[in-house]
Image: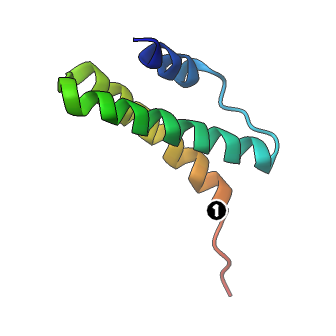
Amino acid sequence: MELIEKAIAFENRKMRFPTTSDRIMAAREAKELILSLNEIYKKNKDTKIMDVMKRLTVIKQRIEKRLKGKPLTS
């Protein structure tokens, strides 16, 4: 289960991305991990995998929220 270990390592990494390209790469990596874990989850139905996917999704959403920025108001 090296994929789960990779996901946990991503989760424990510092989430400081100084540049936009770093944020984009992190969001893509999170998405890739989530989709890969989902394929395993479809076969096993293991709750630990689902928990990891949920945590990664929260991280990915935070990164994407930061990428979109604040909405412009008039």
Quarter assignment of residue 54: top left
Q: Residue at x 59, y 36 (%)?
A: 29
Quadrant in which the C terminus appears? bottom right
**Residue 73's x, y, as percent?**
66, 81
Colour scheme of the picture: rainbow
Give residue 5's position: percent from left, percent from top: 47, 13
Q: Position of residue 43 (x, y in %)?
A: 20, 28
Residue occupying the point 50% across, 48% down = 61
Horizontal side of 15 relative to 2 (left or right) equals right
Residue under label 1, please give it.
Answer: 68
- Residue 65, placed above or below residue 62: below
- Residue 4 vs 73, above or below: the answer is above
* Residue located 32% across and 34% down the image: 39
20 shown above or below 36: below
Q: Please name the residue shown 22% across and 34% down the image.
A: 42
Q: Name the residue at the bottom extreme.
A: 74
Relative horizontal placement of residue 8, taking residue 29 as reference (left or right): left
Can you give x and y, in whole percent of width and height, for residue 70 in the image? 65, 66
The quarter of the rendered structure image containing the N terminus is top left
Q: Amino acid at mark 1?
A: Lys
